[in-house]
Image (cartoon, rainbow, N blue to C red):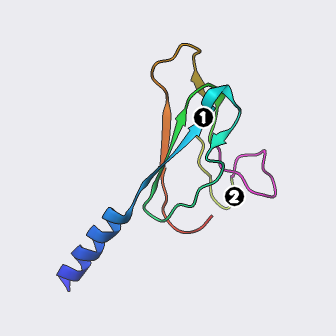
C-alpha cells in the first residue's frame, strides 16, 4: 500500500507541467496565449515583457475588480518593465485543483 501511494505521488509530480504566459509581448497589451488549460499541480508562469501589467483574478460578474469572495484571488501587483530591460519580472502560481 505504501508503494502505491509513493508511486502515485511520483506520477502526479512527473505529470505536472509549467505553462508560460507572455505578458505584453512586442509592446502589446495582451497575454499570449490568450487562454490555457491547466491541471492540478501545473505551474503557470507569467513573464512580464513590457510596460506595466498585472495578473489579477476576478469573476465573470465583475471582471474589473479583484476577486475577494468567497476567497481572495491571486494578484501579482503591478509589474513595471523598463524600456531597456534585459531581465524581466515573473509571477508563478501552482494550480491547486480543477476549479476555475
Write the start and end of the magenta stretch as one range: 56-67
Label 2 with label 1: CB-CB less than 8 Å:
no
Is 22 in front, or is 39? 22
Q: Residue at x 62, y 53 (%)?
A: 72
Furthest residue in direction bottom, as rendered: 1
Number of marks in picture: 2
Number of residues whose C-alpha sits closer than 10 Å to that of mark 1, classed few (under 14), some (14–19) or many (20 or more): few
- How much space separates mark 2 and mark 1, taking CA atoms? 18 Å
Q: What mark, if any, has residue 29 been given in the picture? A: none
- Classify the position of the C terminus by image quarter: bottom right
State the image coordinates of residue 82 (x, y, percent, origin top left).
57, 16
Number of residues whose C-alpha sits closer than 10 Å to that of mark 2, classed few (under 14), some (14–19) or many (20 or more): few
Main SS of residues in magenta: loop
Visible in this render: residue 63? yes
Q: Quadrant of residue 56?
A: top right
Q: Quadrant of residue 51?
A: top right
Q: What mark, if any, has residue 69 been given in the picture? A: 2
- Residue under pointer 1: 77
Amino acid at each position: 500500500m505504501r508503494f502505491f501511494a509513493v508511486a502515485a505521488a511520483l506520477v502526479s509530480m512527473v505529470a505536472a507541467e509549467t505553462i508560460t504566459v507572455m505578458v505584453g509581448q512586442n509592446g502589446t497589451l495582451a497575454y499570449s496565449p490568450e487562454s490555457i488549460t491547466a491541471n492540478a499541480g501545473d505551474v503557470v508562469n507569467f513573464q512580464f515583457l513590457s510596460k506595466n501589467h498585472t495578473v489579477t483574478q476576478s469573476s465573470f460578474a465583475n471582471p474589473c475588480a479583484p476577486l475577494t469572495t468567497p476567497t481572495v484571488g491571486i494578484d501579482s501587483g503591478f509589474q513595471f518593465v523598463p524600456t531597456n530591460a534585459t531581465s524581466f519580472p515573473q509571477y508563478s502560481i501552482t494550480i491547486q485543483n480543477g476549479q476555475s
